[in-house]
Amino acid sequence: MFSVRKMLPLFAAIFVLVVPTHAHAQLYAKGAPPGSAFVRILNATPAQSPAGFVGDVAQASLPAFTAGRFSFLPPGEYPVQVGSRKESFKLEADRFYSIALLPDSMKSFVLEGFKSQLKAMVVMMNLFPDKVLSLKTADGKVTVLDAVQPFTAGQREINPLSVSLGLFEGDKKIMDVPPVTFERGKASSLIVGGTSAVPVLTWDEQK
């Protein structure tokens, strides 16, 4: 005889497997169809950016070294225009694209979504053209993100916690990072802009 009680563990197992698959849409853009691509503009310049478009999706003007909100689109190749500058980028399913407006070009930072909604996500986007950066605990003893190359991003799922962090070049500490609490189901992105002499650190938190 069919028993709902006996089937409950199976339903629970299926639920656990399904949730991470759709966590992208729940986290970044409610209502996104499965297999969507997610995209936003990142202003990687020291001045206010012009407004723009990704495909036909409007993107707001942004303060220096900040990012907009994610929008979702079907996978494909799209023109990205910010002010008078225009380039095309290919967007793939279940990927998260931060299209960085640099002083003389655009650059795509590509990230993956959560594998477990029980974790927090830490991301670092290195906008320095000449520095390989690491994110460590403030005392330098524990490495959170190691050797993030210029104009690339590192990411890692961690347990939710509050921790003091520092920005490092190898074993050399560049500066302390503004405090942040990593929360379950939230992605916290550290945007490292400015110059190596005068870094500008900005936390962008998406939930």
Image (cartoon, helix red, strand yellow):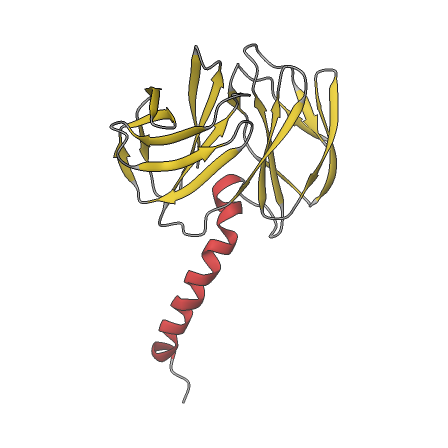
Instruction: Tell me where residue 156 appears, x and y as whole percent.
Output: 42, 42
Instruction: Tell me where residue 199 appears, x and y as whole percent.
Output: 43, 15
Front-most of residues 89 and 194: 194
Instruction: Tell me where residue 134 appears, x and y as whole percent.
Output: 40, 30
Could you tell me how many numbered marks the image carries? 0
Does any portion of residue 177 appear in the rendered image?
Answer: no
Does any portion of residue 16 appear in the rendered image?
Answer: yes
Q: Quadrant of residue 177?
A: top left
Identity of the residue drawn at 50% across and 26% down: 126
Q: Is residue 207 left or right of residue 75?
A: left
Q: Is residue 101 left or right of residue 186?
A: right
Identity of the residue drawn at 31% across and 45% down: 159
Q: Quadrant of residue 41?
A: top right
Q: Is residue 170 left or right of residue 29?
A: left
Identity of the residue drawn at 45% across and 52% down: 115
Instruction: Tell me where residue 141 appears, x and y as whole percent.
Output: 26, 34
Quadrant location of the N terminus in the rendered image: bottom left
Quadrant location of the C terminus in the rendered image: top left
- Seen in the picture, residue 7 relative to 80 is either above or below; the reply is below
Residue extending farthest front: 171
Identity of the residue drawn at 44% across and 15% down: 200
